[in-house]
Amino acid sequence: MDTRATGPVLELNKAVPSFDESGLPPVPFSMRLMPGDCAVVEARDASRTTIFADMCSGLVPLTDGSVKFMGLDWNELHDRETNALRGRIGRMTRRQSWADFLGTHMGIMLQQLHHTTRDMEDVVAEATRLSEWFGLPGLPVLRPTMLSDGDLLRAACVRAFMGRPRLLLLEDPLEASSADLEAAFLGALTTARDKGAGVIWLVRNNAVWQGYRQGITSMWRLADDGLVAVRTG
Amino acid sequence: MSSDEIVDPTFQHDVSIRRVLLHLVLPLLALVLGILAVVLIGVHSYRTTRAGVQSLTHELLGAVQHYIGQEVSDYIMPAAAGNIIAAGMIGHVPAAVQDRVFYSYGGAMLRSVPQIQSFYLADDEGHFTLITRRKDGKNQERTTLQVRNGHKVFHHDYYTDDGEKIGEADDDAKDYDPRNRPWYQNTENSNEIKWTQPYLFATDKQFVMTSSMRFKAQDGHTLVFATNISLNELSGFLDKIKVGKTGNAIILDSKGRVMAGRHLMQQAEAAGWDPNKMVLNPKTHPVFARGFDHYRVRGVGAHSFALNGKRYVTIASLLPNSSEGWILLLSAPESDFSSFAEQSSRQSLQFAGIIIVFSIVLAGLLIRQVRRSERSDRRLEAQANQISREVSAVQQVAVTPRLFELSNDSLVLTEQLAHMAQARRASIWRFLHDGSAMICEDSYDLKQDTHSGGFEMSRTEMEAFFQAIEEGEAFTVARAASDPRTAQFERLVMREVGTRELSVHPVHNAEGIVGALVLEDASMAEHLVYFVDLVGSITGVRLASIYNRSAEQPDAQSTADAMHQALQQAASLPATRFDNMLMRAPQMGGVSASGIYPAVAVLVITFSDPVVDGSAETAQLLALIDHLATEVQRIALERHLFAVEVAGHRLICMAGCTAEEDPTALIRMADAALTMRETFMAALSASNLEPVFTMGLDYGAAFGGAVGEEPKVFNLWGQTVSVAELMAQGASDAGTIQVTERVYTELRDRYLFRSRGAFFAPHLGLARAYILAARR
């Protein structure tokens, strides 16, 4: 349990994304996500959602302000540190993100194998456990293109929750998914939050997260004029 | 931070390096550079001074040498120039007055020039005339070589300086012939002035040298005029001359024989009055000997050399107007001239030393100052960290749902309190409405990570402690056992975990003091800025909501007693049912055909699938399973459980299947669960197997009944059963008993629990799960 990690997990401090390179409106974005927080960000535009998640991962150049993850400014770090830091982010994205020359299992485990010194067996065991948790019969070893959309979504869930993510950037995982995935997803989400992860749940409509209403700590809307806080409850 | 990360992005080393560079290396470097500059300047100034002093020394020595040369020349001049004058005078007078001219010239010279000893005049016929001073140095003596009676005699006439004759004498001249004397012979075929080797008169200790000159008289005879000049006076003069402070001068001839110099007579005596042996002795005159060597190699001029660790300068020059090859050698230690320079160098070195010491002190002060400011920076940073930790702890507290409702156990309060204060144990106590007792709402043990609560302390037991809380002031006791206020509390509560320090923060609300926060062994308690107050206020609000409730009847009996009582109460229950594999003859007494039971305790035990190969192992495993099943039967009977079902790898135990709520059911079930766990552990480890089971326990409403044809099978359904199954499946480690929040609420004053955190369960939403650790 180290929910007592000090300071916010993610802090957008008047970060102005470069419009040319991101397509996001060049207005200041401000947001603070503490460990264990779950922020729902509503956005109609799917590509903008992805770019916003990129910005949180330090992938979008800023013209002003700063984006800090675990107190570290993305812009002030060297490549080595930046990459290591991204290893602490669990992400589900709508963008094509599976390498098709590898089996899905490798795609799932690659992050842990690359960034940590954990035993292969240990990682496999965790991946298998999570796969079962998310309703797969086991760790999928087929290539990603061979999996059905539903199973690929489950695999994406497994990949996002692998290891101990400090930040989860989840782009609408529950859309067009079966109800059993919802229960597993919310269970995994709660466990991760309990271990101190901050969650940004990017949704397209607010119906999906209603079942988890009591667990949401803040609610935002990604609009043309930036990030707008929405009253909850 | 997870330790298995390959690159730790939070590790930032450049800051500390820069800090060390800025705070330590830079001042030290500046100091070293300063010292180096001072030393370099000192060395440079010493060198230039020394070079200046050296050239000055040489110039000075040159001047001295010039002066001595002049003096020596002046000293010898009467002998050299006098010869020419006398020769001219005598050569141009008739032979009859030659003697008179000689005497008058010689007399005048002897009276006025002290270094002149005597004059000779000889001719080619063997005539010889001499004029000299008397031995007393006042009167004059005129000597002529005469032949009397066929014998050569010296006839001496004595005159006063005024020319008055005062006596005469003769002595035998033996076969003296002036023409055989060296001063006569060395003028052969020359009309230049010639010098003889110096010779010593041992009798009157005179070191004399003769200069002679040949000329023609009017009558055609060849005459030789000679002047004897004493070098003693020259030595006396050289003796008096000081070169520098301790240096002196010496005159040598080209063969290194001493002509004049200090202590000439001693040298002459040592040489046995032989001028040829009066050479420079390196033992007695090491500096001159070395200087002469330098002259012989390098010629005239100034030469510096070191001798016995001391530097000397010598200057050699040829003397003008003197016998050929005479050398004037001056020597002096360099220090005589450069001592002031050395002194000034030493002084500047001392100044440099003082400056260096000052700079070191200043640098030390600077470093000290920097380190102090750094330390205070660190302290500020630590304080800022503490504040941010508190903020994050507050955040954790704030996100807890239903924080202010007492029905919801806000375990986060004690957990965060214990973490923030680094306390061994943090607990929240509340007074009963009449103040007669205190009940522990929640107690969190940081070391074991377990929660407990529900126990009670009555006022009669610890009046002093109650009064101390009711005073309303927070207090900290370093040794709880020795303080009268807390001695009883220490004995009853703290001694079991071995804590010593106690800090108590009373909880206030509108009703006054309603309870207290108690921290044991809290090392950080004094650094907490506001967190304790905040938790106190939250607790105050929480307690206010129930404070008006009617007096509660705390169950003060111990777990063992309760168990005993529960068993006694359960004695009237129907005998345990063993269905399916553990089925016995169906006994349906007391059970309605189907019905709803309001409070059923359900324990689900799941076993992981055993891996077997070979029939021998299978047989062994079956024997073990049989053993375990028998044990379960035994325990179930002992605890009066309602039924035990076996389904696949699951074992479902239930208690409390009565129409009325049975308060003992859960206690019996929990006790059975712990006993089964111990039994299973023992049996599995005896067979050298890992604990391959997990247990889940829930308590709540369920429905069930006997189904099927005879023999009917009893079955139970409902959320309680499925949640218990979920608990068993989701247990963190093998061999643990995971329970729901409801079980925890019911049992926390009898058992120790460990919080596992919040979980999301389908149809249930967010809920907490606990691990049942042990009996209290």
Image: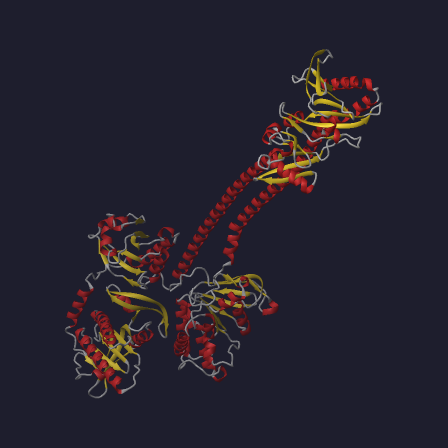
B538 over B257 or under it: above or below: below
Q: Nearer the viewer, residue A55 or A82?
A: A82
Q: What is the x, y in percent for residue B241?
A: 65, 27
User: What is the total number of numbered labels drawn onto the structure image?
Assistant: 0
Q: Nearer the viewer, residue B288 or B464?
A: B288
B28 over B416 or under it: above or below: above
B75 over B333 or under it: above or below: above
Q: Nearer the viewer, residue B502 or A118?
A: A118
Residue visible at 31% across and 49% down? B476
Q: What is the x, y in percent for residue B252?
A: 67, 34
- B460 with respect to A18 (left or right): left
Q: What is the x, y in percent for residue A156?
A: 46, 77
- B148 with respect to A30 (left or right): right
Q: Give the colour scheme shown.
A: secondary structure
- B253 with respect to A109 (left or right): right
A58 over B318 or under it: above or below: below
The quarter of the displayed image where residue B261 is located: top right
Can you say which quadrant of the picture contains the C terminus of chain A? bottom left
Report whether residue B49 is seen: no
Point out the residue furthest to the front here.
Answer: B149
Report whether residue B165 is seen: yes
Can you say which quadrant of the picture contains the N terminus of chain A? bottom left
The quarter of the displayed image where residue A226 is located: bottom right
Q: What is the x, y in percent for residue B635?
A: 19, 75
